[in-house]
Image (cartoon, helix red, strand yellow):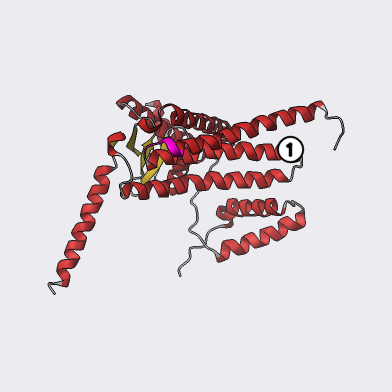
């Protein structure tokens, strides 16, 4: 098997995460335990080799923290919305499947957008077209053309926020141009 | 255990009580949604969203009640795995459900996926026909 070597820098977020999970599961963050966890993380990452995740090369914590808070708020809103719809409309709820073309073509960005969408109000990803990076989103309680436009905007906004946090510089520049225009 | 609860204890207890009740309510909401919604896709909405928040609130109240910092990483990991896996399972179920037609078309205002799936199915059928012809008549 032909394996492309990846740099330790690219693998570092994965290793840090594995060590964190190790420490959390042992409930022990002493240096010795973490060192042993790091050893196991490296062995696991070498043995169970996965295609490397191509990170954008930048991560803006200033954007990430407000996004996380807004995201949590949206999860709360989504939960109450679903609860309300289940009680108030129930079997009479109308939906739509909407195709939304994303800006980014990176797998990480499409995946992250899909995850965010599935947890915020009214949307669920049904199908992904990787070649054109189009998401097919199932919207709950979509009744009119206006609702469809809102849903589409919501998807594009979620992607824009994620690009601002961890998109590549090219994506960021393209986004800035689009917003400015 | 202190015999007399301090003010902080009271606040922590109150917050975790609220979290537990709301968390349980969210799980109840997910169950009601599963029963009341008409088709598979809208049921997946009910199965993903309130459930994730419900688990978050219940884990948070566990963390508040145990009062030891080392449980927080475990609870965090548990929740993150939930957040990562729930959309994936919902997507897989939704995708399979769409293709096996477990949905009510009359409840959809638009369906922009239908044409794409039909086209893919046509292509597959054409490929199959071509393959059958290659085999030749028996």
SS under mark 1: helix
Q: Residues within 10 Å of mark 1 (few under 14, many from 20)?
A: some
- The vertical placement of A49 against A162, above or below, is below
Which chain is disc 1 placed on?
A: B
- Left or right of A146, for residue A30: right
Point out the image quarter for the N terminus of chain B: top right
Q: Position of residue B119 (x, y in %)?
A: 22, 49
Indicate yes or no whether the magenta region holds residue B37. yes
Q: What residue is at 57 percent from the left and 31 percent from the top?
A: A69
- The vertical placement of A132 against B21, above or below, is below
Indicate yes or no whether the magenta region holds residue A35. no
Point out the image quarter for the C terminus of chain B: bottom left
- Count up the numbered dots: 1
Residue that numbered label 1 is attached to: B65
Image-quadrant location for residue A33: bottom right
Q: Position of residue B122 (x, y in %)?
A: 21, 53
Which region shows up in magenta? B34-38
Q: Residue furthest right?
A: B3
Judge whether residue B116 can be spotted in this image: yes
Q: What residue is at 74 percent from the left and 51 percent from the top?
A: A29
- Left or right of A110, for residue A30: right
């Amino acid at each position: 098997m032909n394996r492309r070597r990846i740099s330790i820098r690219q693998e570092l977020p994965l290793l840090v995460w594995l060590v964190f999970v190790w420490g959390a599961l042992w409930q022990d963050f002493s240096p010795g335990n973490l060192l042993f966890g790091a050893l196991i993380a490296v062995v696991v990452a070498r043995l169970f080799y996965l295609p490397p995740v191509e990170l954008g090369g930048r991560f803006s914590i200033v954007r990430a923290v407000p996004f996380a808070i807004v995201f949590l708020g949206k999860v709360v809103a989504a939960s109450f919305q679903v609860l309300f719809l289940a009680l108030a409309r129930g079997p009479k709820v109308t939906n739509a499947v909407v195709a939304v073309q994303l800006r980014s073509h990176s797998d990480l960005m499409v995946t992250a957008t899909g995850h965010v969408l599935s947890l915020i109000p009214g949307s669920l990803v049904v199908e992904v077209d990787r070649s054109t990076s189009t998401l097919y989103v199932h919207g709950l309680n979509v009744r009119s053309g206006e609702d469809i436009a809102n849903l589409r905007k919501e998807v594009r906004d979620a992607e824009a926020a994620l690009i601002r946090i961890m998109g590549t510089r090219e994506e960021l520049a393209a986004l800035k141009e689009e917003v400015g225009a | 255990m202190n015999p007399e609860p301090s003010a902080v204890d009271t606040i922590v207890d109150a917050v975790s009580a609220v979290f537990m009740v709301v968390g349980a309510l969210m799980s109840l909401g997910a169950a009601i949604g599963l029963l009341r919604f008409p088709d598979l896709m809208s049921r997946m909405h009910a199965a993903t969203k309130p459930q994730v928040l419900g688990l978050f609130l219940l884990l948070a109240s566990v963390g508040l009640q145990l009062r030891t910092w080392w449980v927080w990483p475990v609870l965090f990991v548990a929740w993150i795995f939930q957040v990562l896996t729930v959309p994936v399972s919902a997507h897989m179920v939704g995708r399979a459900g769409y293709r096996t037609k477990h949905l009510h078309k009359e409840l959809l205002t638009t369906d922009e996926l239908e044409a794409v799936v039909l086209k893919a199915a046509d292509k597959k059928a054409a490929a199959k026909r071509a393959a059958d012809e290659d085999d030749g008549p028996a």
